[in-house]
Image (spheres, rainbow, N blue to C red):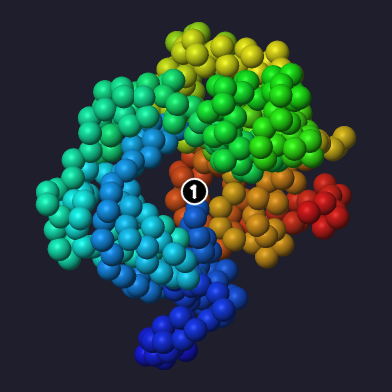
Amino acid sequence: MSGSKIAKTIQEFKKQKDSLEFPTDGLVIKLNDISKRDALGYTSHSPRWARAYKFDAIMKESKIVDITYAVGRTGKITPRAEIEPISLAGTTVTFATLHNQDYIDELGVGIGAIVRVAKRGEIIPAVEEVVTPGKEVFKIPDRCPSCNTQTIKKESLVDLFCPNPDCPDRVKNGIIFYCQRKQMDIEGLGDKQIEFLYDHDYIKSIADLYDLKDQKEKLMEEEGFGEKSVNIILKGIEQSKQKDFRFLLPSLGLSELGHKVTELLIEHGIDSIDEILSIAKDQKKIESLLEIPGIGPSTIQAFQENFSDKRILKLIERLKKAGLKMKADPIQVADQQPFAGQSWCVTGSFENFQPRDKAMDLIVYYGGRKVSAVSSKTTHLLAGPGAGSKLEKANELGVSVYDEKQFLDLLKSLKIDFKNLI
């Protein structure tokens, strides 16, 4: 398809999109030549052979009747405009984000203003323009709306933060985060249930969830908490004790310690809370974390701050006593270990390993270690079409590089039938 035909197709689709049975905010344009796709490969985030084209968001006018703020689990304070209801992208919108004070100042937003609102990515309503200004530009108060603590600005950030770790909204949102599906996945505990439990003094921290069973009879007397729903909640809490440490650690919501960093630590043998606390007490060990590709100075600083904080240490101790897993589950491995002592990295795209992590899982199963970046400690790189900087660095460091055919030949020589394992 030629460039002019692509442009024409986009314009035709834009005319039809509002009559579709599903919401859409754009089109994805892809190469339909598999060999060219293979040649272009992938970045760390997306294929190089595809591009997303976003439509201009539909904007509608409304009036700001009030401006409130939300305090997140990190303490970040996000202002939002309460607006007269409008229909936008198939939903009724009554709130729109204002991001931060700099954004408010730039637009000149105030209560009473007539504004244009759009749904960014067809999901998040945001104030985009001011049509008629309000009486004055709104200023976010310098005290937290939840706990009245003096707010602060962090270095290089435009947002205001509440620094109080005991701020009710911060604590509630931290518990909500802990229970989410991508974290500890505790069934029955959504935002509303957690807010109720917190506001009615059933729980005041993540660790209190594991004592909730002691208040079962009292909880069943509350409106909306019948025996069936309470049993679902308590069962979900109990089942969370079996979640792998690789989920528990990032679910605590500690600064810089998300899923990616947790995996990096585990990949490099730091696979338990005892090991982490041991490192936190030794400056040389802390500095050695910088040798792990993907971990930088900001992560090191957060690591020190997190594991010297008495509140966090107390939380960890309570979770230990509650019976949660404090060591990562061992990865299942084969009796045969031909990749033992080897560290493999992967880049590019592959015909037989989609996604490419399947190749790394195979290496780990047979005794090897997967790493996310090439370093002097990397022994092998599996490189497919579209390989970029990782391949260049591997060549510079003298790392053994295998393409897909060579890797398949290697598996064959080791009598590994990979098709039965992926």
Residue 106: x and y in percent read 16, 52
Q: Residues within 10 Å of mark 1 (few under 14, many from 20)?
A: many
Q: Which residue is mark 1?
A: 390
Considering only vertical position in the picture, is 420 above or below 380? below
Q: Is residue 100 visible?
A: yes
The residue at the point 42 percent across, 36 percent down is: 72
Location of residue 54 (image quadrant): bottom left
| Residue closer to the observer: 315 or 190 | 190
Q: Position of residue 230 (x, y in %)?
A: 74, 34
Q: Callout 1, which amino acid? A: Lys
| Residue in the foreground of this view, choosing between 41 and 415 | 41
Residue 163 rendering spot, x and y as whole percentages: 34, 23
Q: Quadrant of the C terminus?
A: bottom right
The secondary element bearing badge 1 is classed as helix
Where is residue 360? Give x, y as percent. 68, 46
Q: Residue at image x 44%, y 20%?
A: 166
Residue 266 appears left or right of 154: right
Number of numbered discs on residues? 1
- Specify whether 334 is left or right of 222: right
Horizontally, is 409 left or right of 175 in the view? right
Instruction: State the residue lying farthest toward the left.
Output: 135
User: Which quadrant holds residue 275?
Assistant: top right
**Residue 297 shows in the view:** no
Seen from the viewer's position, the closer of residues 192 and 401 is 192
**In-image side of 91 versus 184 (left or right):** left
Residue at x-position 45% and y-position 26%: 168
Find residue 89 and report its image quarter. Answer: bottom left
Q: Is residue 114 above or below residue 158?
A: below
- The residue at 52%/16% (across/down) is 312
